Amino acid sequence: MNVAYGDLLRAFLPETCLVAGALLVLAVDLATGRRRARPERMATAAVVGAIAVLAAALGTLAMGTSGAAFGGVLVLDSLSVATRLGVLLLAFLTLLLVGPLVRLPHPAEYVAVLLFATAGLTMMAAAQQLLLAFVALELASLSLYILAGFDKSRPDSAEAALKYFLFGGISAAFLLFGFSLIYGLTGSIELPEIARTLATQPPGPLLAVALVMVLVAFGYKAAAAPFHLWAPDVYQGAPPSSAALIASASKLAGFTLFVRLLWGGLAAPPGVPSWGAVAAILAAVSLLLGNVAALAQTNLRRLLAYSAISHAGALLLGVIVAGRAGPGPLFYYAATYGIATVGAFGVIAVLDRAGGCQTIADLAGLHRRSPLLAGCLAVFVLSLAGIPPLAGFFGKFVVFAEALRAGGLAGAPGWLALLAIAMSAVALYYYLQILKQALVAPASPIASRLAVPATAAAALVAAALLLLGLGLYPSVLLRLFVSG
């Protein structure tokens, strides 16, 4: 494939902006940062990083939905553009929280690695080739491993990074082995060509092994049960901003790659995906285990981790019905879940800066200490619980409705939708436990009022307003996929 470097830069324009921004962050800190205090260095790095993210968003919009790019390695359609913009939005909100709240050594390096992770995630959103998909996934994963263990003053942060790395390495081996089998069966690494080849040959045992390998790998990446064991420790030990990106942007980009790979390359024969039964089992186990285990949690971050496992089950249901309903419902659910999760970890970051927030009881009296934080947390938690008129409600509604429409109660999607609805009632209990502490429980006599930095307050309020606005006007996102 003979491609000029200009074509290469245009095809990867958002990633080019992010990588250039990461290098600029390091250069600015090297030139001016050593003479300043750490908070000022972190604020400067976050500002430069935010500018790079905005430039990447403008690049994404400028490229538009022009179809295949860079010799078919990338695809620029409505799903890839929307996912890239969603990832960049989540990264931007995270950077607004990083500047005033994060007190870590090597602030420029932290922001640079965050931008590298974002570049990997945006590349995942547009990948249409197995090799590029693997490279993008590993770029994002390796960066996230580093972000999880960046707080060297806390042993549980190092433990989180180690567990995340070990599980991630295992999943990478599964994924690469599955990809190698797919290449051996089809002779191609391009998803459209793989789909055409599989449509003309009967499924065999090697294809079944390849599908299982791929599903296991993505089960690890998505924290779907029973491949979820890393998630509670990572959510608990990682810095709040790192956990926010891991829980939000990586899920959005990961499920986009997942649905593109499964429906764009491996749904053979057309309309009868052989991976559907395995995905349905993973979804059911995730819904059950995530919600039941969350009931027993007293640590707030671990509760959010088990909640994420249950949401992974519902997102897998969105993957199963994406062949019929399109990617719109799945994207809407993943994007709005990501916004709520970034907001929840943003509140935790503010509380951490003020003295620590580990258990649910640490939220007691939050309505007295900071009405702004309590109000925003209520919006985020209620959206995660699926309470109208917030976006989380409509995200669940549109996925469950499409699952029921796919085959009624006679098919697996219908039964999964009923299970998910029942588990949503279970989830409401532990979400209300959070709100009980934040909005009803009295504050400690020695607790003082919380000062929320302006940029962090802006990020939290913006996230809350987005959840309300997208809940009232869901068509803003869903109509992006009507013709795409």
Image (tube, rainbow, N blue to C red):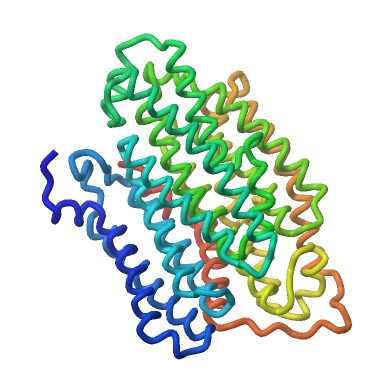
User: Left or right: where does residue 143 sit relative to residue 63?
Assistant: right
Q: Quadrant of residue 285?
A: top right
> Is 181 located above or below residue 353 in the figure?
above
> Is 373 located above or below residue 469 in the figure?
below
Give x and y (percent) for residue 10. 19, 56
Looking at the image, which residue is at 55% across and 75% down? Answer: 105
Give x and y (percent) for residue 449. 74, 85
Q: Quadrant of the C terminus?
A: top left
Looking at the image, which residue is at 62% across and 23% down? Answer: 409
| Most distant residue in the bottom direction | 35
Q: Nearer the viewer, residue 59 or 374?
A: 59
User: Left or right: where does residue 122 sit relative to residue 300?
Assistant: left
Looking at the image, which residue is at 60% across and 42% down? Answer: 223
**In this view of the protein, can residue 347 be seen by the observer?**
no
> Is 186 located above or below residue 369 in the figure?
above
Looking at the image, which residue is at 52% across and 35% down? Answer: 217
Number of callouts in the render? 0
Give x and y (percent) for residue 109. 45, 70
Q: Nearer the viewer, residue 230 or 329?
A: 230
**In this view of the protein, can residue 477 be seen by the observer?**
yes
Q: Quadrant of the N terminus?
A: top left
User: Left or right: where does residue 5 sit relative to residue 339?
Assistant: left
Give x and y (percent) for residue 73. 25, 40
Q: Quadrant of residue 21?
A: bottom left
